[in-house]
Image (spheres, rainbow, N blue to C red):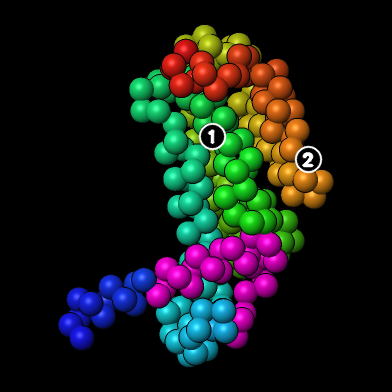
Amino acid sequence: MSPRKSVAEARHTRQRIVDRSMEIASLEGLEGLTIGRLASELGMSKAGVLGHFGTKESLQLAVIDAAAELFARQVPQQVPDHLPPGLPRLRALCEAWVAYLEREVLPGGCFFTAAAAEFDGRGGPVRDAIVGMHALWQRDLRLHIRRAVSTGELPPDTDADQLIYELIGIMLALNHYLQLHHDRSAPARTRRALHRLLGVFDRGQIARGS
């Protein structure tokens, strides 16, 4: 086997482990990950699984990174490039966020909602990584809110932190109603709530860039 093929196969195996771990963690939490279970489900030895990460904590951190990459592909990267910063892009981000949860890309719903609830009372690198991902997303939202204020798209007295708080609260409610109650009317309710906060919130208008 050539070194290049060996590296490619190792990368593929590592990705298989992370992908399956992300699915399990979305349903059962990051603490639900065990080397034995992963080895059994993936047809590997425990040593083979552990060899890619070294520790369970390293595996958990890799899963958090993978979940962040998945969220980036499913939400920010779904926003059309032609939309300008500010309110148009903020609306599109929120619509992509709703659609991501509505499609239930992961079997347990929003990975970071589950992970935050699991680790909010703990310390350590895993909690720090979750907090860091939340902070990055809030930073992106804040940039567009401030841009919308500066261009007059939002009122000059808009409290960016309060608006972010309400947006996140709405999305937490959406995830809750989809996952706990299996309420398929929840996305429509979410869009109505976003309409109150951000004005016209319509998929067709977002696609047209209005």
Whether 134 is drawn above or below 82: the answer is: below
Q: To which residue does mark 2 refer?
A: 183
Examine the rendering and report whether any part of residue 120 can be seen: no
Q: Given the image, on which type of amino acid does mark 2 rest?
A: Asp
**Residue under the point 52% across and 89% down:** 46
Magenta residues span 13-37
Whether 85 is drawn above or below 7: the answer is: above
**Residue under the point 61% across and 35% down:** 98
Where residue 181 appears, as percent x and y from the top left, is 82, 46
Q: To which residue does mark 1 refer?
A: 96
**Residue under the point 68% across and 65% down:** 29
Quadrant of the image occupied by residue 7: bottom left
SS of the residue at dot 2? Answer: loop
Task: Quadrant for the N terminus, please.
Answer: bottom left
Q: Is residue 18 magenta?
A: yes
**Residue under the point 62% across and 48% down:** 104
Where residue 148 appears, as percent x and y from the top left, is 51, 17
- Of mark 2 and mark 1, the one earlier in the sequence is 1
Where residue 153 appears, as percent x and y from the top left, is 53, 11
